[in-house]
Image: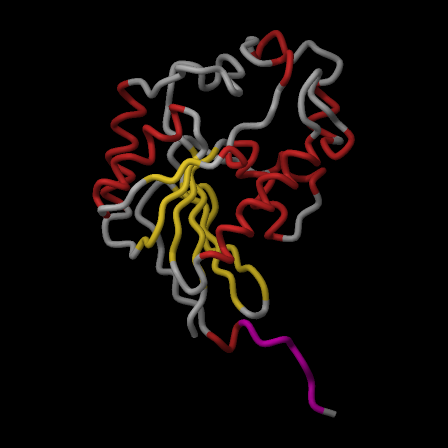
Amino acid sequence: MKMMYLLLIRHAENDWVGERLAGWTPDVHLNDKGRAQATALAQRLSRTPLRAIYSSPLERTLETAQPLAQAHGLTVQAREELGEAGYGSWTGRALKDLKEDELWPVIQVYPAGARFPDGESMREVQARIVAELDAIRDAHPEQTIAVFSHSDPIKMAAAFYAGLPLDLFQRLTISPASVTAFAFTRFGPRLLCLNHTGSLPSFAIEEHSMQPDHEEH
């Protein structure tokens, strides 16, 4: 059975990861570890039959995508809607300080009701990324596509396609340079791997496993 495969890939390491909330801050580039991760990612996906590569327009995602694009002879297509969450006045702040903010536990426990100060709400981020991914899927039926984005948007998209409520998206982990893969079938999306940083498993899906359960009477 032919189906569309969507690979959601987080950008590789940079000096802001785990320290500060980069958001849409310009000129945040991969560090040495991140560049090595991007090269390794291209090697891991060298035999994956990619037909297109899309990316957030931010430098750290474009730099992560470029080695893979070169390996497949493709051009990275930047899309604004694949960008990081709009963190508003939180942008650039240290994570250790943000954890003292009264909004922090709300974002962890009730993200569906949270909005970043002067920025996007969590619902708006999820709606934006899913709408863009759906448009990309529609443009590439029965193809395998790689999309480079950021931790929160990828977690939100993965939660949506896996049928999880937004309030549970924080239970997912998306590491730098990790791959989260979905197959889109006529019975809906199927999560193939989450936060994968090693050799990818087979994407084969047995058709009988997608049939709705029923009993004969």
Among the 4 quarters of the image, the one containing residue 78: top left
Q: Residue at x 54, y 16 (%)?
A: 21
Q: Quadrant of residue 26?
A: top left
Tell me if 191 is positioned left or right of 217 in this view. Answer: left
Q: How many marks?
A: 0
Q: Quadrant of the C terminus?
A: bottom right
Q: Residue furthest bottom?
A: 217
Q: What residue do we see at 72% from left, 31% from top?
A: 111
Q: Position of residue 56 (x, y in %)?
A: 45, 33
- Image location of residue 12, percent across then percent down: 37, 28
- Viewer-closest of 208 and 138: 138
132 or 208: which is nearer to us?
132
Q: Say whether residue 36 is left or right of residue 143.
A: left
- Nearer to the camera, 90 or 201: 90
Quarter occupied by the N terminus: bottom left
Return the x and y of residue 150 as percentages of the image width and height.
49, 31
Which residues lie in the magenta part?
210-216
Above-or-below relation of 16 to 215? above
Looking at the image, which residue is at 42% across and 65% down? 142
| Residue 113 image position (x, y, % from top left) | 78, 31
- Magenta segment's dominant SS is loop
In this picture, residue 111 sits left or right of residue 16: right
* Above or below, 197 relative to 64: below
Magenta-span inclusion, residue 214: yes
